[in-house]
Image: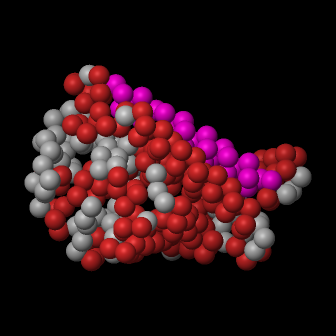
Amino acid sequence: MLLQAIDNIDHIFEPYRKSIENSYDDWFRKRFENDPLKRDLYLTFMSLFVVHWIVGAIFTMADYCALKWPSIRRYKIQPKELEKSFNLERFMNLATMATVNLFFCFMITTFIHFIPSLHRSATNVPTFTRFIFEFIISIIVVEAGFYYVHRGLHYPSFYKHVHKFHHEWQAPISLTILYVHPIEHFLVNVIPILAGPWILGSHPSFTWFWIVFSLVVGMSNHSGWYYIVNLLGPPLFHDFHHHLFIGNYGLMGLFDRIHRTDLYFRQSRYFQNYRIILGMVPKEIDDKKGD
């Protein structure tokens, strides 16, 4: 019954899948002459540079409006820290580090193409049910990878020399997703995100969709706004980690729940606001303990 249902669903979406596949093959052949390195360097620029700065600019404009108007500022999780985000020197350091890590992605993209086993991929665009399967597996893989590597970076020796850099922003904004040490960028951002599509041998169309999705979700998780909704949970969860530097090591809380590293979060005022109804004013969070 299950296999029959899957076949029926895939049959419904097959014309759309085939259309996407034909468009992709035609685009790949004409624009890049079937050269995967040219394709991936182009997509690295479009999906990372362009998306990062456009999404970041939108959130930054929202932050600036919140700085000027109290009626909007009350929907920031840490409103009293907002002015620090617009310190020119601090913001320029943020932009510089983000740019360095974006260029680092070009180096990684190029390196991958010298190791054939690292850029293996399916030749066909996935069916609808295969797409959903790969999407779910990729979420689980990135949640596990992010949790364990991120938690490891909080050991004193790693934290002092690597992860402390990211935590200079106690009240994060969206662009701080790439304000990280390059080593951390590789271990926390690059490997967990690419691991799922690599394990599954995903088609490039899925891989690049997943990269853009992960980037936008990561930026929203660092935005510091209530009411931002994404599939991996609201920003409140990760903002708590930035505020106190403890617990909430994962993205959506699955492994934090398993390992009970979210206990302090669940006892805090952050958690009281975690499922707040749209339109209600959040309880103020302004003390060191977050309760």
Residue at the image position 67 percent from the left and 46 percent from the top: 45
Residue 108 in percent (x, y) is at: 67, 63
Q: Magenta span: helix, strand or loop, mainly?
A: helix
Q: Is residue 212 magenta?
A: no
Instruction: Determine if residue 192 is in view.
Output: no
Q: Where is residue 286 in the image (x, y as percent from the top left)?
A: 15, 45
- In the picture, residue 17 is in which quadrant? bottom right
In front: 221, or 28?
221
Instruction: Residue lying at the far top in this picture: please name it.
Output: 69
- Give the left or right position of residue 290, taking residue 19 as reference: left
Residue 50 is at least partly visible in this image: yes
Residue 51 highlighted magenta (yes or no): yes
- Residue at image position (40%, 56%) is 166
- In the depicted structure, whether residue 102 falls above or below residue 85: below
- Give the image's coloring scheme: secondary structure
Q: Which residue is drawn at 25% across and 65% down?
A: 246
For the C terminus, the quadrant is bottom left
The region drawn magenta spans 38-65
Q: In this view, does 270 lie to the left or right of 116?
A: left
Side (left or right) of 278 relative to 3: left
Q: Which residue is drawn at 35% across and 56% down?
A: 167
Number of numbered labels in the structure image: 0
Quick one: 184 or 262, which is closer to the camera? 184
Residue 130 in the image: above or below residue 81:
below
Q: Which of 235 and 157 is in front in this view?
A: 157
Counting from the top left corner in percent of width and height, residue 107 is at 69, 60
> Observer-nearest residue: 96 or 64?
96
Residue 255 locus on image (x, y percent): 33, 72
Q: Measured along the vertical axis of the image, is residue 155 above or below residue 134? A: below
